[in-house]
Amino acid sequence: MQSRIQIVQGDITTISVDAIVNAANPSLLGGGGVDGAIHRAAGPALLAACKKVRQQQGECAPGHAVITEAGDLPAKAVVHTVGPVWRGGEAQEERLLQDAYRNSLQLVTDNGYRSVAFPAISTGIYGYPRAAAALIAFNTVSDYLTTHSLPEQVYFVCYDDENTRLYQRLLAQHAL
Ligand code: ADP
């Protein structure tokens, strides 16, 4: 049977899945890294949708997630989640990163979506050590999938070789 988790190397804005996840910042109004790429590719409708959420709910705290339309992206929806800033490991970073993945998946399930693509949340500007972040991402997603039938398929979209290698190793160990 094909695994419900797949690793893809590339740009998350080009992937045709039901929902892509954005590593957003608390303002929800765009930023650098994957957030900037998603807003550039999605166009003004995404920013307008984010502004609306922001007006209704205020900032998005680390570990939380919200969902919007996807503007011009091939995806149907964007889940915006805020990962933790790495502060050395004693500031609840691990729990907040787990929460970011779990709350994103919950929104995907609640909206009846069958596929979702995640970037490596917090491993860019937010500075989370990559191997530790990959392990948390992988374990949190696989635990969630054991108790939920949706999403059917989860893609980890790795932008660089290092993350691709880390995730591929985890998937190979998982499949044993
Ligand atoms: P954070 O602020 O959560 O650290 P970043 O956007 O800085 O978010 O980085 C998160 C991860 O997303 C990094 O591993 C970075 O290499 C990756 N990334 C950057 N651009 C893209 C993209 N277009 N598609 C997929 N991943 C990307």
Image (tube, grey):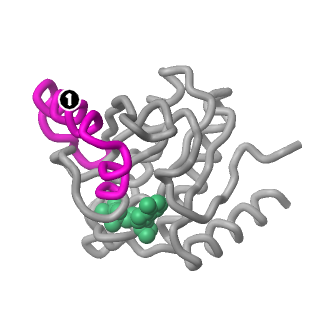
From where the camera sits, is residue 96 visible? no
Check the image and report above or below for 148 versus 13.
Answer: above
Q: Which residue lies under the disc numbered 1?
A: 53
What is the residue that sits farthest to the bottom in this orientation?
Answer: 162
Q: Is residue 151 left or right of residue 126?
A: right
Prevailing secondary structure of the magenta residues? helix
Count of picture labels: 1
Question: What's the residue type where badge 1 is placed?
Answer: Val
The residue sitting at 49% across, 70% down in the picture is 132
Q: Which residue is depicted at the point 59% across and 56% down?
A: 138
The verdict on residue 48 being magenta is yes
Which image quarter holds the N terminus?
A: top right
Asked if residue 18 is positioned above or below residue 39 in the image, the reply reads above
Label 1: state its secondary structure: helix
Left or right: where 1 falls relative to 161: right
- Give the crowd class for mark 1: few <14, some 14-19, many >=20 residues within 10 Å: some
Q: Is residue 7 left or right of 125 when viewed as pictured?
A: right
Q: State the quadrant of the C terminus.
A: bottom right
Q: Name the residue: 52% across, 51% down.
A: 14
Disc 1 CB within 8 Å of nearest ligand 1 atom: no
Ligand 1: give its quadrant.
Answer: bottom left
Q: What's drawn in magenta, residue-wise?
A: 35-63
Residue 10 lies, in percent from the top left, at 56, 63
Residue in the picture at 58% in, 41% down: 16
Please check the rendered image and state whether residue 39 is part of the magenta-colored stretch, yes or no: yes
Q: Is residue 157 visible?
A: yes
Foreground residue among 107 and 155: 155
| Residue lying furthest right | 1
Give the percent coordinates (x, y) of residue 11. 51, 60
Image location (x, y in percent) of residue 50: 23, 35
Q: Is residue 92 left or right of residue 9?
A: left
Q: Nearer the viewer, residue 176 or 80?
A: 80
